[in-house]
């Protein structure tokens, strides 16, 4: 009880002290601010900051306001348009009794044109006319929009970056009916950052001229379009038409930028197969891929014409050799054919030859087919799958590339085992791998089930002083294509700065200067040597001979972590823009 009384006494003392202080002679009386003079002109915070001018007019008006309205007033202003498309007055005039006037920006349509927007700064030039309670500067965006007619809502699908589909408005240009645009294609901020407001494209007809070439078929063309900011490179990824690059100048490289029509001649959908490019850095070539960007037009119900083909290996019997193809057909594919052709032949001409019978093919009658393989030379070949509708018309085609080595019956002698240490593409140790030596060429070696479960082949001279890794597949095929490995000496030539491969005979260690790359796309950075450390038995046998040959690919899959190509690894600047 004594404690409670003590606390109450302290609180009372505090209240009394505060009361005494508030009654002292040191208090100050409120002094109101002096009233503002002048017209007190300002821009409203509710004024629009974007204006669409009209092609058949010559001015657009921006409102400005004042508080004092006793008499007429002429207020000095400045209008700044760095493009010089729009001009404005040096003063704005208020009528007596009016609190609002307009700043008229004048323009000439012949100079400005469509979709050429200016950012314009409007300012009250003399502070004597302003007010502390309003803004004296306003920035507006002004331009003349091209005339577009909405066709309705279609579907914009982009599989490379977002892997998503979006319902988007599609518009057609009134002045050029072959030009279209998708409104807000990159509006999904969870996937895209700072993408363009529109993706605009034009359908060039066969017989028209595009990039100095008379077109053999209809082509979907587009100027550079910003898709997203990529923080890893601190750069914007642009969607770029392949014809702007040295490696894809010819129209034979534009076939995946195509349009499909409905029976009445209207557009069903367009497909865009671009380079994804970062200016001054490099990019990713998707010009030879299907289904990268697909724009389905309103009113079209797409058919399931999807195709997929996987190389299933080589089968050799007394009747000859054949290639196994594992295929998947969409629900609306009525029939399909598979053929084998040398890699590099134009796909669209081969499709026609398959249909006509000029190229031998096999009808698909199940999930796997065997295609006769009549080629004798080592190299890369394509398994081509073509799908047809119920009327026998081609509706889709795709292919997969594989490698073939002639003379696959070469005898190899096992000489031991060892451990592969990866770091330039695959990562980590790969122990227990076996090393073999060619019976026909004793300077030729292969390490089996290496990389992504393939033979890793190399040459080591009989003196043991020269080692060179084959240019060969890793067995890994990702979203961006098949990954190969080469020796830095071969890949870079005279510009190689990463050193040469060599064999440390004393310690039984191969040092491989490896370079991993995707043909036509780019390469991965070289972190250092990759090594294969021999056990004792293999080391002794290796001293006896050295060899080299082409690899043969195994069909098994190996669980080795792979560096991500797009997000974690920089590209060489192998993609050159014209």
Image (cartoon, rainbow, N blue to C red):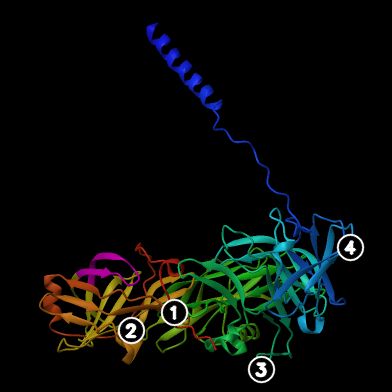
387 relative position to 7: left or right = right
Give the extent of the magenta segment.
418-434
Q: Earlier in the sequence, mark 1 or mark 4?
A: 4
Q: At 56% across and 75% down in the image, what residue appears?
A: 289
Are the two marked residues, 3 and 2, in contact with CB atoms closer than 8 angstroms? no
Q: Earlier in the sequence, mark 3 or mark 2?
A: 3
Are the two marked residues, 3 and 1, in contact with CB atoms closer than 8 angstroms? no
Q: Which residue was labeled with disc 1? A: 522
481 relative position to 462: left or right = right
Tag in front: 2 or 1: 1
Query: How far apart in space, not on screen, are marks 3 and 1 (Cα)?
Result: 27 Å
Is 428 magenta? The answer is: yes
Q: At 55% across and 27% down in the image, what residue appears?
A: 22
Q: Please tell me how many numbered marks the rendered image carries.
A: 4
Label 2 element class: loop
In the figure, 171 relative to 288: above or below?
A: above
Q: Nearer the viewer, residue 121 or 28?
A: 28
């Amino acid at each position: 009880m004594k404690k409670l009384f003590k606390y109450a006494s302290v609180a009372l003392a505090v209240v009394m002290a505060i009361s005494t202080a508030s009654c002292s002679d040191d208090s100050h009386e409120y002094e109101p601010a002096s009233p503002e003079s002048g017209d007190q002109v300002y821009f409203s915070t509710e004024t629009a900051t974007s204006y669409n001018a009209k092609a058949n007019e010559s001015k657009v008006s921006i409102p400005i306001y004042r508080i004092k309205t006793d008499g007429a007033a002429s207020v000095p202003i400045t209008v700044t348009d760095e493009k010089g498309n729009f001009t404005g007055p040096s003063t704005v005039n208020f009528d007596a009794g009016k609190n609002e006037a307009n700043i008229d920006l004048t323009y000439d349509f012949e100079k400005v044109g469509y979709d050429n927007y200016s950012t314009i700064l409007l300012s009250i030039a003399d502070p004597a006319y302003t007010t502390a309670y309003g803004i004296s500067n306003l920035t507006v965006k002004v331009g003349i929009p091209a005339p577009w007619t909405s066709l309705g809502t279609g579907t914009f699908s982009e599989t490379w970056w977002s892997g998503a589909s979006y319902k988007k408005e599609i518009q057609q240009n009134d002045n050029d009916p072959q030009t279209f645009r998708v409104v807000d294609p990159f509006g999904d901020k969870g996937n895209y950052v700072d993408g363009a407001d529109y993706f605009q494209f034009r359908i060039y007809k066969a017989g028209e001229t595009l990039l100095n070439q008379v077109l053999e078929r209809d082509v979907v063309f587009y100027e550079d379009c910003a898709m997203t900011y990529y923080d890893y490179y601190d750069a914007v990824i642009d969607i770029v038409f392949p014809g702007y690059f040295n490696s894809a100048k010819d129209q034979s490289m534009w076939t995946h930028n195509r349009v499909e029509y409905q029976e009445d001649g209207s557009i069903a959908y367009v497909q865009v197969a671009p380079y994804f490019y970062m200016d001054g850095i490099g990019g990713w070539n998707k010009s030879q891929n299907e289904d990268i960007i697909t724009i389905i037009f309103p009113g079209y119900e797409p058919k399931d014409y999807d195709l997929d083909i996987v190389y299933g290996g080589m089968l050799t019997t007394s009747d000859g050799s054949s290639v196994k193809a594992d295929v998947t057909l969409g629900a609306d594919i009525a029939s399909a054919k598979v053929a084998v052709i040398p890699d590099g032949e134009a796909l669209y001409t081969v499709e026609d030859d398959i249909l006509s019978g000029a190229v031998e093919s096999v009808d698909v009658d199940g999930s796997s087919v065997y295609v006769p393989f009549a080629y004798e030379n080592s190299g890369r070949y394509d398994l081509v799958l073509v799908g047809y509708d119920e009327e026998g018309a081609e509706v889709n085609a795709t292919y997969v590339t594989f490698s073939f080595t002639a003379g696959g019956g070469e005898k190899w002698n096992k000489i031991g085992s060892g451990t592969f240490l990866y770091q330039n593409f695959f990562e980590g140790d790969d122990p227990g791998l076996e090393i073999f030596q060619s019976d026909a060429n004793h300077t030729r070696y292969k390490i089996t089930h290496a990389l992504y479960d393939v033979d890793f082949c190399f040459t080591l001279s009989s003196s043991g002083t020269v080692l060179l890794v084959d240019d060969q597949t890793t067995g890994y095929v990702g979203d961006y294509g098949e990954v190969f490995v080469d020796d830095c000496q071969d890949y870079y030539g005279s510009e190689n700065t990463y050193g040469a491969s060599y064999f440390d005979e004393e310690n039984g260690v191969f040092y491989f200067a490896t370079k991993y790359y995707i043909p036509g796309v780019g390469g991965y950075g070289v972190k250092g040597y990759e090594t294969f450390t021999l056990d004792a038995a293999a080391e002794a046998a290796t001293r006896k001979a050295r060899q080299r040959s082409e690899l043969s690919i195994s069909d098994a899959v190996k669980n080795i972590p792979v560096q991500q190509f797009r997000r974690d690894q920089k590209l060489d600047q192998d993609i050159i823009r014209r």
